[in-house]
Image (cartoon, rainbow, N blue to C red):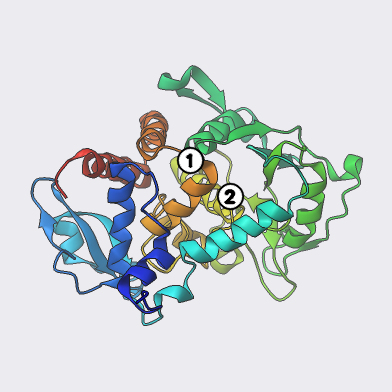
Amino acid sequence: MGISASSPARRYKTLIGDLEEDISSVEHKMYSLSQYVLDQNSDMLGKHRPELDMCIIDTWSAKNVHEEDNGSKKNDRADEKFILFQLMISEKPYFCSQTFTQWNTIYKFDQWWTPCCKKGTKIYIQPVESFPQFLTDFEIDLKHLGGSHDFFALLKRLLEAYFDGMTIDILPNVNFHDSKWKIKARFHHKTNSKQYHVTDFFPKLRSVKPADGYCILGLSWTDLYPTEKLNFVLGEAHFAFKSAIFCFGRCEPKIYDPETFKDIDEMDAKLLWRIIKVVSHETCHLFGLMHCWYFRCNMNESCSMAEAASQPLFLCPVCLRKLQHACGFDLINRYRRILVILQDIVSVFPSQEIEQSIQWLEKCLKFLLTDKL
């Protein structure tokens, strides 16, 4: 007799894919954590592991965000021990969020439909219009990666580590007047800041993507808006066009106060963290990843800059499985590459978020490289 569609084995394979293929013990250890999505009552859930000095999986709910915003202590257990992954509590069935099988169906069809013999292995970064002088003059010393880097070289290094297996190239800046790009613009009624219509960028970016590119990511200093009725968007990606656009969000109308507002005039840890978070999130969309409702994850949906900045930099096991399938990276090598870059960055730009990300990487590597579960 075959396995029924509702059996645990079938549901797990739908969620995370077939782990019977030739994968390493480290990968199996990471992806097997997805089982907690299907079994929230596991005896292992929420249990502290003294030998690892952390809790592998614990639970998290949306009420924590509200409590955190009000300044209250959101999770006593989180203060007591390090938690590697936090399982989202939801009444929705697991398949209502994007499973590996759902993602892989879309991804395979896209590869078949792409009218080229070989899938591009490059991610192109396309600067759009002008950037302030403090950004063009920016330099940071990455001691472990060859010394001084300008802003776009830093971004290239970060994305090469995050999307290990892909090559990142920077294209020359696009000027709308010279290139004759027709991008709709407006001035926001509240802030009086210029904004570009986000969806106008997708076909334009695709048209300048070189043939060897898998996708292209536009970067704009000017704010973006999605529709006439909506105020602002940090960034947006279009999987079919393989293009995305991201702005630095100088002025989010939701938090705009004309009495206290001051435009960004220097690179600091807060701005750099916001850039890292949003660029990595939007680029993941270009690989077909949708918003995640399984764990706290870089692919969680956000409705504000503050919410996006509060979310983890790293992917949960379900989303990581998708990205690894697309890029073909080794988990340990990828985490080590990201760790080196973040350590160099935090030595110049001290940041609680980056420090927490470094701690997460160190704990995750310890978990993966320790024989005991």
Task: Give the amino acid at mark 2.
Answer: Thr
* Residue in view at x 15 percent, y 64 percent: 44
Q: What residue appears at the point 79 percent right and 59 percent down from the top-left corner?
A: 200
- Side (left or right) of 223 relative to 287: right
Tag 1, which secondary structure? Answer: helix
In which quadrant of the rendered view does residue 227 lie?
bottom right
Q: Nearer the viewer, residue 306 or 46?
A: 46
Q: Secondary structure at mark 2?
A: helix
| Residue 357 in the image, given as x and y percentages of width and height | 34, 44
Residue drawn at x 37%, y 42% is 354
Q: Is residue 237 visible?
A: no
Left or right of 297 in this view: 323:
right
Name the foreground residue: 369 vs 186.
369
User: Which residue does the numbered mark 2 point to in the structure image?
Assistant: 283
Label 1, residues with CA under 10 Å away: few <14, some 14-19, many ≥20: many
Q: Where does the image place residue 29, in percent across and percent down from the top left?
A: 27, 49
Number of other residues with Cα within 10 Å of mark 2, as a class: few under 14, some 14 to 19, many 20 or more: many
Q: Are marks 2 and 1 in contact (CB under 8 Å)?
A: yes
For marks 2 and 1, the one nearer the N-term is 1
User: Is residue 31 placed above or below 164 in the rendered structure?
Assistant: below
Residue lying farthest bottom? 91
Residue where numbered disc 1 is placed: 162
